[in-house]
Image (cartoon, rainbow, N blue to C red):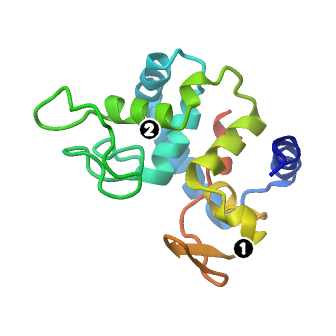
Amino acid sequence: MNVQAKLNQYTELFEQMEINANALTDVKIVAGKMQANEQRYQEVSDAMGGLMPWYFIACIHNMECSLNFNKHLHNGDLLFQRTVLVPAGRPIAPPKNPTGYTFLESAVDALTMKGYDKKESWTLEEMLYRLEKYNGWGYHYKGVNSPYLWAGSNLYTKGKYVADGVFDENAVSKQLGAALFIKLLA
């Protein structure tokens, strides 16, 4: 995959994106919940050097955990133990609290595991690239705009992984894509 070509594609797609009228109210409600927790997301960013935009973390939190602070940012498993789903066994370090991991511990581990702690540039295109990478490139290889980014917009209609490695060309994502929130929050 040519990274620069993919970044250019994100620029074009973001400029073309329109939030579907039937999704706009929900996008505004969720974006408001993200904003209400901006400080918690900023705490994660600060723990990683402070360069990562808080709303990038909020987008992943929404996609993986439905904004539930009792779940691992890696995949939505509950924080009381290491992750069970892919990636299993995270965080590797034991929790600092005997009742389980904190959201901050988990989020820092998840984002560090992806190498995002080493990124100094956070352009719009790079954020979209990293969000799709976080979820996986499966949609790219199917020729479908990833619902992880674009669901709820004019850029996505159907095609969804309904289980790990199982793609249904007629399934439709019910989640709103992360790019919609970036449009409102950036």
> What amino acid does circle 1 point to?
Thr
Other-residue count near label 2 (Cα within 10 Å), few / some / many at <14 / 14–19 / ≥20: many
Q: Position of residue 14 (x, y in %)?
A: 81, 48
In screen coordinates, is 158 left or right of 5?
Answer: left
Identify the secondary structure beneath mark 1: loop
Q: Position of residue 154 (x, y in %)?
A: 78, 64
> What amino acid does circle 2 point to?
Ala
- CA separation in Å, label 2 and label 1: 29 Å
Does label 2 or label 1 sit earlier along the sequence?
2
Q: Is residue 62 above or below residue 45?
A: below
Residue drawn at x 63%, y 48% is 133
Q: From this viewpoint, which residue is outermost toward the bottom? A: 170
User: What is the quadrant of residue 17 in the picture?
Assistant: bottom right
> Residue under circle 2?
110
Image quarter in which the C terminus is found: top right
In screen coordinates, is 101 left or right of 135?
Answer: left
* 150 or 126: nearer the viewer: 126
Residue drawn at x 26%, y 45% is 82
Q: Position of residue 56 (x, y in %)?
A: 58, 36
Question: Is residue 51 visible from the viewing direction of this image?
Answer: yes
Mark 1 and mark 2 in contact (Cβ < 8 Å)?
no
Identify the secondary structure beneath mark 2: helix
Q: Which mark is residue 180?
A: none
User: What is the quadrant of residue 100 in the picture?
Assistant: top left
Q: Nearer the viewer, mark 2 or mark 1?
A: 2
> Residue under circle 1?
157
In screen coordinates, is 108 left or right of 82?
Answer: right
Residue drawn at x 54%, y 63% is 175
Q: Is residue 109 above or below residue 16?
A: above
Q: Position of residue 184 (x, y in %)?
A: 67, 41
Residue drawn at x 52%, y 15% is 49
Question: Is residue 66 visible from the viewing direction of this image?
Answer: no
